Image: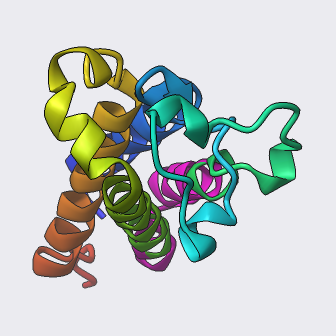
Amino acid sequence: MRSFVDLGLFLAAVALGIGTVLPMVGGVRSTEIPLSGLRDGYPSGDPTSLAVADLPLYEALAVPLAAASVLLLIAALFDSVVTGWAGAILALSVCVAAAVRIFQSHGDYLAENHSTALTNQNGFVLLVSGTLVGLMCCLVSLRRPSRQPARG
């Protein structure tokens, strides 16, 4: 891969890593949101109902996001296109599933109280931007393969 693709993947990994520990919506961090909510849905009401007290880290939404960040970092360090795609697709699927599930259960509340509920969502912005940058870098790496040195 080219050096700017590696730099983009590195920046995407950093954005995903930082976004994993910052609040996603309504001041709730992804380390407080249960991963099983992607499958089962979240309780409706206030977005603070997303948070579960004393949630073990291995059951949190932060685990697949951190794994995607690590995959993008490995792709940037070792020029691995397959690992980059794996990290970008994992991050995209988790971000989209979380956004859809949160909107299904809290869409009315977020629409009515958007001025206060969406003020502290730096983590979600970093997760989405890191995912999009990672996808763009993977697409560029497919479009422009690195040149092989001439033999002769």
- Residue 68 within the segment the image draws in magenta: yes
75 or 88, which lies in front?
88
Q: Specify the farthest residue to the bottom.
A: 152
Main SS of the magenta segment? helix
Q: Position of residue 104 (x, y in %)?
A: 34, 62
Residue in front for this viewpoint, 23 or 148: 23
In front: 12, or 141?
Answer: 12
In the image, residue 142 above or below residue 99: below
Query: Residue 11 in the image: x percent, y percent?
Result: 35, 36
Residue 141 or residue 50, whichever sits in front = 50
At 61% from the left and 62% from the top, the residue drawn is 37
Colour convention: rainbow
Magenta stretch: give its range: 66-85
Residue 128 counted in the magenta span: no
- Residue 14, image x and y in percent? 46, 33
Q: Quadrant of residue 105?
A: bottom left
Q: Is residue 48 left or right of residue 152?
A: right
Compared to residue 51, the image places residue 69 above or below, namely below
The quarter of the rendered structure image containing the C terminus is bottom left
In this orientation, does residue 3 appear? no
- Please tell me whether residue 30 is drawn above or below residue 118 in the rendered image: below
Residue 100 x, y percent position in the rendering: 33, 64
Q: Which quarter of the image is occupied by the N terminus?
A: bottom left
Q: Residue at x 59, y 76 (%)?
A: 39
Whether residue 101 is visible? yes
Residue under the point 12% across and 74% down: 144
- In which quadrant of the rendered view does residue 71 lie? bottom right
